Image (cartoon, rainbow, N blue to C red):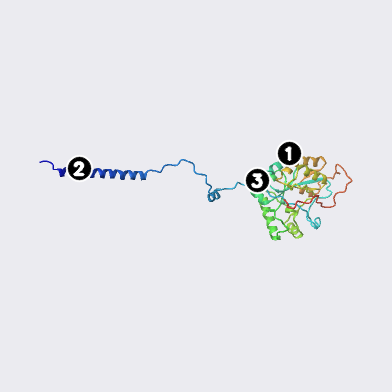
């Protein structure tokens, strides 16, 4: 039986169809493989296109240590300060003592350096601290106290007590007291109003809280932006008198620079440097005459030695 031509043609046709199907299947398989293949990894660095929204979300500003701004201190005008029991100095101090006072601390950057100078020179000072600053750097008030220095209250937030209501003034003073005493472990009895801002009702309110209000009688203007150490020293030395209370500030580079020579010059002239409370206390031993008797007349009562008009913008 011979193979008929149609049968051969069928075989060829079937083979062709089979081959076509196989090719089709391979093509489909290849396509599927290609679709599942991972995309080529782009190793190039991403374009530096600023994304404002993202930048704002992830940006963390650097920590800025803000030192308290020193006030433009002005002694209250028109108030009978001595009669009201406000201390500006202790006139005619028989022991020829003066007090260095530092406002607006503690200062993270400079308080340890101030303390080292006082320690090296063997003198103590009075620091009027701000409660909120004490909370921010809690170890510094203890450092000040542990060195034998005196600590006073300068309110919690450097509040202008004259502008505030009596209730707010009292609350701010009390808050400052708690913050300072908690760290310094020293009972506070002295208060210096920020900027020297006072009126009679505020004075009475502070005194009702058990405080002695302390101002100053020598202001060498270390709060000025352009203060220099030599000006600070000259200003103090030309106005020094037994019983003087000298207003200085923490966190001031010119003040820090002036301090060693200032202490040397004061003691070289025969003065003793002590705290405000020591100045206020009565002498415990017989009074010796001043080392260098003078015929000059001391200033009559509290004096603000500021000789220049304060800058308009304040500090
Ligand atoms: Zn102040």
Q: Residues within 10 Å of mark 1 (few under 14, many from 20)?
A: few
Residue found at x 69% / y 42% = 112
Q: Answer yes or no: do the residues labelled 2 and 3 have beta carbons within 8 Å?
A: no
Q: Give the camera-side residue of 209 and 293.
A: 293
Residue found at x 80% / y 40% = 265
Q: Residue furthest front?
A: 5
Q: CA distance from mark 1 to mark 3?
A: 21 Å
Q: Answer yes or no: do the residues labelled 2 and 1 have beta carbons within 8 Å?
A: no
Q: Residue furthest right?
A: 295
- Please tell me whether mark 1 sits on a helix, a strand or a loop: helix
Residue picked out by circle 3: 139
Residue picked out by circle 2: 12
1 or 3: tag closer to the N-terminus = 1
How far across and how far down the image is residue 15, in percent? Answer: 21, 42
Q: Give the camera-side residue of 85 and 16.
A: 16
Q: Residue furthest left?
A: 1
- Please tell me whether mark 2 sits on a helix, a strand or a loop: helix
Tag on residue 217? none
The image quadrant that residue 29 belongs to is top left
Q: Nearer the viewer, mark 2 or mark 3?
A: 2
Quarter that holds the N terminus:
top left
Tag on residue 120? 1
- Please tell me whether mark 3 sits on a helix, a strand or a loop: helix
How far across and how far down the image is residue 31, in percent? Answer: 33, 45
Q: CA distance from mark 2 to mark 3?
A: 100 Å
């Amino acid at each position: 039986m011979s193979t008929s031509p149609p049968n051969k043609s069928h075989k060829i046709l079937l083979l062709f169809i089979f081959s076509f199907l196989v090719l089709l299947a391979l093509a489909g398989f290849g396509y599927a493989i290609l679709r599942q293949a991972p995309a080529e990894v782009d190793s190039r660095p991403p374009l530096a296109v600023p994304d404002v929204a993202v930048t704002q979300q992830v940006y963390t500003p650097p920590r800025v240590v803000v030192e308290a701004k020193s006030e433009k201190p002005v002694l209250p005008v028109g108030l009978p300060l001595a009669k009201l029991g406000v201390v500006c100095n202790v006139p005619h101090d028989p022991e020829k003592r003066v007090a260095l006072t530092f406002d607006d601390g503690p200062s993270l950057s400079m308080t340890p350096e101030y303390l080292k100078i006082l320690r090296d020179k063997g003198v103590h000072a009075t620091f009027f601290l701000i409660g909120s600053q004490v909370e921010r750097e809690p170890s510094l008030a203890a450092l000040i106290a542990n060195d034998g220095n005196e600590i006073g209250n300068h309110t919690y937030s450097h509040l202008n007590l004259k502008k505030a209501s009596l209730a707010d003034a009292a609350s701010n003073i009390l808050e400052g007291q708690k913050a300072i005493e908690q760290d310094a472990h020293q009972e506070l009895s002295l208060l210096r109003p920020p900027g020297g801002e006072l009126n009679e009702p505020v004075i009475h309110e502070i005194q009702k809280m058990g405080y002695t209000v302390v101002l100053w009688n020598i202001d060498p203007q270390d709060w000025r932006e352009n203060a220099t150490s030599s000006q600070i020293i000259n200003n103090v030395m030309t106005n020094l008198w037994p019983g003087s209370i000298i207003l200085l500030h923490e966190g001031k580079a010119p003040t820090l620079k002036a301090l060693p020579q200032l202490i040397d010059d004061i003691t070289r002239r025969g003065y003793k440097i002590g705290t405000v409370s020591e100045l206020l206390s009565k002498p415990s031993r017989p009074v010796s005459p001043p080392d260098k008797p003078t015929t000059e007349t001391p200033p009559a009562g509290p004096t603000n030695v500021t000789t220049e008009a304060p800058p308009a913008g304040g500090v």
